[in-house]
Amino acid sequence: MKRLRWPSWMPIDPYIVLLLATVGLAALLPARGAAADVTSGASTAAIAFLFFLYGARLSTREALDGLRHWRLHLTVLVCTFVLFPVFGLAARALVPVLLDQPLYQGLLFLTLVPSTIQSSIAFTSIARGNVPAAICAGSFSSLIGIVLTPLLAAGLLGGEEVGFSTDSLVKIVLQLLVPFLAGQVLRRWIGGFVTRHKKVLGLVDRGSILLVVYNAFSEGMNRGVWHQVSPVRLAGLLGVEAVLLAVMLVLTWYGARALGFGRADRIAIQFAGSKKSLASGLPMASVLFGGQASLAVLPLMLFHQMQLMVCAVIAKRRARDPEAATDADPAAAADAPGGSAADPVEGQPEHRVLR
């Protein structure tokens, strides 16, 4: 019997439906008391395990080889941690016309979050771009963001909105960086197992994020933060994020061309430099914002869905570009984990990238 599949004509990723359902569950049945303590501890452990898997999947040799392509990685880092925050600060002019202060704080936090790993790789693969460069760019961004994002949040958000301290930075490092490094150390022994069971472990990845979303929104419900959000403000936030994504997609593509990068590299820069990581942003927001984390991650969740939908369309068009057959990097495709440059990573169908 054939497996049931999500209809290809549906524009919303099934994982996003699960995210929204998780938010609804937290609104109806938020974790309270002892259940909240258990959920909080489980979400912390789940994210630590998620980054452990990231470390176990990344080839150390591949990461070291990627350092030689420093111009590309520097370009992605500038897009992620300089251009994005500049636009986030400029959005302050939209308060209180389109955004209120809590949503603006969440939008600004969104601009400080590292780039994605898995979806950057998948879209670069579909578009026949430089897949190894996308792997290293996303990984470097996530590692640097573990330290840089809290520091930027403390400097740009500041005040009572962000509970930044040395303890919070240490907590983020222990939850994200230490498991990643542990995965790198143990990769020699478990790398083969992780590769063979990547589909099952992918479910663990996504389940971890759902658990963190449930925990953050449960805490928000318990603290009564949702009365601050109105449909008009949400519509304004969606409009602002659509413009932000469009601007970054244009800048990363044409800016990379102006810097002299080839087509394959420009694809990697566009997809790694225009997106933000839900997996990294959620635990950081939980540590930095505490009870206000649900509002802080709302702009990130909306942007996450938007970037997946838009980048999926762009990736497919890039794959049909006549230049793809002549300018794509065959060596990059051959080195990509999980298949050729034409195939998405981790066995995900071309039209469904789940993170």
Image: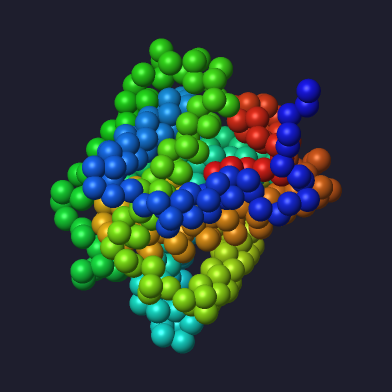
Residue 348 in view of the camera: yes
Q: Compared with residue 63, is residue 120 higher up or lower down, i.e. above or below?
A: below
Q: Position of residue 108 (x, y in %)?
A: 39, 67
Residue at screen point 63% across, 59% down: 253
Q: Considering the image in quadrants, where does the N terminus appear?
A: top right
Classify residue 315 as left or right of residue 307. right
Residue 286 position in % (x across, y down): 31, 52
Question: Could you tell whether 173 is left or right of 350 in the image?
Answer: left
Q: Is residue 105 above or below residue 123?
A: below
- Specify the color scheme: rainbow
The quadrant the C terminus occupies is top right
Compared across the picture, whether 134 is left or right of 160 comes to right
Residue positioned 47% across, 76% down in the render: 230
Q: Residue furthest right?
A: 322
Q: Which residue is painted at 73% across and 51% down in the image?
A: 10
What residue do we see at 78% from left, 26% from top?
Answer: 2
Which image quadrant for residue 326? top right
Q: Position of residue 91 (x, y in %)?
A: 44, 77
Name, please, the residue furthest toward the bottom.
97
Q: Residue furthest left?
A: 166
Relative to the observer, which residue lies in front, 207 or 177?
A: 207
* Camera-nearest residue between 241 and 211: 211
Q: Is residue 20 above or below residue 329?
A: below
